[in-house]
Amino acid sequence: MFPMPLRSQNLPGVGTKYEFSTEKGDTVAIFFTKTGTVQMYTLQQGCNTPSAAEMTPLEARRLGNILTGAIIEADQDSVDIAFSALADLRITLHTYIIPASIAGKTIEDLQIRAKTGATVIAISRHSMNIINPPASFVFEGGDAALVIGETDQLKNLEREISVD
Amino acid sequence: MEGIVLALFICLVLALISKYLSVPAIPFYILAGVVLGKAGLGLVASDEISHFFSQMGLIFLLFFMGLGLKIDRIVANRSAVLTSGIIDLNVNMIIGFAASYLLGFTLIESLIVAAAFYVSSTAMALTSLIDNRKLMMKEADTIIWLMVFEDLVMIIFLAIISAGDQNLIIFAVKILFVLGILYTLAHYGKEFLIAILDRDDELPILFTFAAVLTTASFSMYLGVPETMMVIALGAAFATTDPDAFEQHARPFKDVFLVVFFVFFGVTINLSGGADWFVIGVICILAILSKLISGVLTGIFIHHSALSGLEIWGNTIGRGEFSIALAVLYGSPLVGTTIAAMVIVTSIVGAFMAKYATFLRRGIVGLGRRSAPPRRVHTKH
């Protein structure tokens, strides 16, 4: 639902323009230019000169993700997702390489969920993916396990079951 | 052949520099041509190959002009487009024509100079709006539509002048006939065309190239000049998927146009003597007359003379179309004059487009001391 009308316009030779006014009277305009860049202008109410930012398509998508409420922060092997709409719920996805010390054990043996609260949601073994492994799943050394949970739960996991 | 390679290499370096400084590259291409060619070091001479490449550049420029033709959109936007378009046309054509006629050009030469004097560079204006982040200004819309209008006037002008000695009515009938055929083909072949354009192999680009060249080569059978043929083709294709055609024709246009500009510079010959007084007057007037038309447009459309400064800054640069006119119909003297005008106006234009906003703020700032602040931005 858009409370304020969103105007779109095709500008010959330039690209497509989207513009709308906010409830407070500010104006936001986005231009998808033919050169492939995205320009965003904001004009504060009563102000005369807009300020502008030019973005690559990738940067524009990141901005879009932030605005839609799904902030994704990725580091080497973990992704942090925050849902601002769900009372700032933050969830982390982390990959772990299974060490030889726990090879041969099942998820049930290790009592991962009961002890740490984290859940194994996928295993990658020899470039094959196993989604939602059953509790009877037997780990092998070198498996990559994708685990989901809150940051604390993942810390527990790292402490309780010495994976890295 | 070595000449083209040398010229292209120098243009590549110049293009890099101009992008880095964010100024238009066209004046540098022409200057490079002048330095390398007859008027300068004499390192590069035009030959059959360069002539063919230049011709391709011109043909693709005109094909793009046809693709961008949006009569329906102009009609839909009529009042604003017409007001600014007619002010711009009258002021600049009249000043350009009167000045060149008084400076001693013949009647026909004066018409060519006036048209080249009138038509701003669409490429430069749009690039400067994007690069200087001015798309949101209310003047940006006016400028964009002004460019569309100028292109339309240019097409009509080219049609009239390319009729030459032919009877205008017969010529118009021929053009309408060509247009009719191409539109019919585009209309009934629309699905076929779109299917071709959608492929990801070499077919779309090959088809675009072949269609433009084939159409151009038909001109000799019909007595309609190549220029009109490719514009008509562009206009017909614009009814199918103009964006896809632009995408596939752009590489040809970009490369061949550079050759076109640089070899236009190469063929400039100053040994016959250049009248620097005439050139100087035309250049200065070219800048001033756009100021007059810009301020008038600002007053009529935005109720603000200061808006006109912004319009002026972005429309000073003359470019591709002025050179096309010089190449197609200009005598050597006209060519030299237009070349100088393009070089001067595009450099001044790039500078003014960047600083028009500061200039405008400076003037507003000075005015504030005596007058109450104006409400500049109004919502519509």
Image: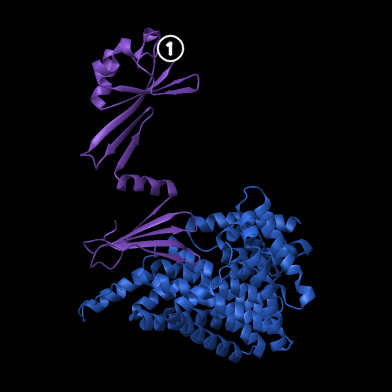
Chain colours: A purple, B blue
Q: Name the subunit of mark 1.
A: A
Query: Which residue is rendered at x = 28% and y = 68% of the image?
Result: A48
Image height of B144 relative to B1, above or below: below
Instruction: Between residue B93 and residue B182, name the one nearer to us.
Output: B182
Instruction: Between residue B293 and residue B13, name the one nearer to us.
Output: B293
Q: Position of residue B272 (x, y in %)?
A: 71, 79
**Camera sees residue B52:** yes
Query: Which residue is rendered at x = 77% and y = 64% of the image?
Result: B47
Q: Position of residue B194 (x, y in %)?
A: 61, 57
Quarter of the figure that contains the C terminus of chain B:
bottom left
Q: How many marks?
A: 1
Query: Which residue is rendered at x = 46% and y = 71% of the image?
Result: B144
Image height of B117 relative to B24, above or below: below
Instruction: Between residue B157 and residue B304, name the one nearer to us.
Output: B157
**Camera sees residue B331:** no
Please indicate whether residue B147 sits to the left or right of residue A101 in the image: right
Tell me which corner region of the image, top left, top right, bottom left or bottom right, holds residue B29: bottom right
Q: Position of residue B115 (x, y in %)?
A: 58, 81
Image height of B83 relative to B250, above or below: below
Tell me which corner region of the image, top left, top right, bottom left or bottom right, holds residue B225: bottom right
Residue that label 1 marks: A140
Quarter of the figure that contains the N terminus of chain B:
bottom right
Tell me which corner region of the image, top left, top right, bottom left or bottom right, holds residue B3: bottom right
Query: Mark 1 Cα within 10 Å, few/some/many (few <14, many 20+)?
Result: some
* Residue type at numbered disc 1: Glu
Instruction: Between residue B200 and residue B36, name the one nearer to us.
Output: B200
Element type at mark 1: loop
Query: Which residue is rendered at x = 54% and y = 83% of the image?
Result: B281
Q: Position of residue B343 (x, y in %)?
A: 56, 71
